[in-house]
Image (spheres, rainbow, N blue to C red):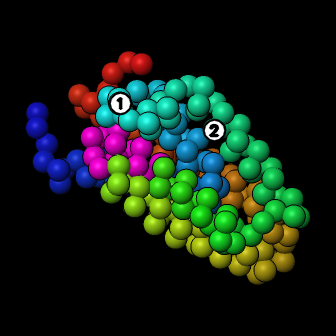
Amino acid sequence: MKHSKKTNRPAKFWPVMGFATLAGMRSMSGPAFLSHCLARQSPAGLIGSPLRLLRKPGVATVLKVLAGGEMMADKLPNAPNRTAPPVLLGRVLSGALVGAAWYRSRDGSALGGGLLGGLVAGAATFASYALRTGISERAGVPVALVGVGEDALVLAGGAALLRGQRPAQDHWRPM
């Protein structure tokens, strides 16, 4: 059954919003959850693309370890501010990566997905920073403790995002 681009849009757009939001909150979480998803689905849209590496289970494992390490390092007193230009750039690039890979995996434009993912990750970086510092100030609790709650939100959000994903119809093949 053929679908118009309009009916396929949510299958590309909303998952990128989710993965890129995770990337804005924790830069390695978006790619880790996305790679886990792609490794299970092996979408054909990534064949021939450098982004196909995200389909490999070993890459998914490495990204998960990096995401866990980032969650621990984030609580250290010398952790850089997420809105500092180099850190913000990393989060935007992480969002761009997940957006490009997801769109490409669904036979869409990697450029369009990358732009969407980068913008969403940048916005999520500032929004999550404002929430974290605001909650810390209003509740009178250390920022690191609020960060633990943020980690729980990232993990729960990522798990929910994964549960909602299905292989693209007629667009996946085993590795």
Q: Look at label 2 and name its amino acid.
A: Leu
Instruction: Label 2, secondary structure: give it.
Output: helix
* Horizontal side, residue 138 vs residue 92: left or right: right
The residue shown at (58%, 32%) is: 60
| Residue occupied by mark 1 | 48
Q: Is residue 132 magenta?
A: no
Q: Nearer the viewer, mark 2 or mark 1?
A: 1
* Labels 2 & 1 near each other (Cβ < 8 A): no
> Which of the marked residues, 2 or 1, is nearer the chain's N terminus?
1
Label 1 SS: loop
On the rendered image, what quadrant is the N terminus found in? top left
Near-viewer residue (64 or 164):
64
155 relative position to 44: left or right:
right
- Residue 121 at x, y = what percent? 52, 62
> Hey, what amino acid is under mark 1?
Gly
| Residue at 50% across, 35% down | 54
Return the mark for residue 63.
2
Residue 172 position (above or below residue 20): above
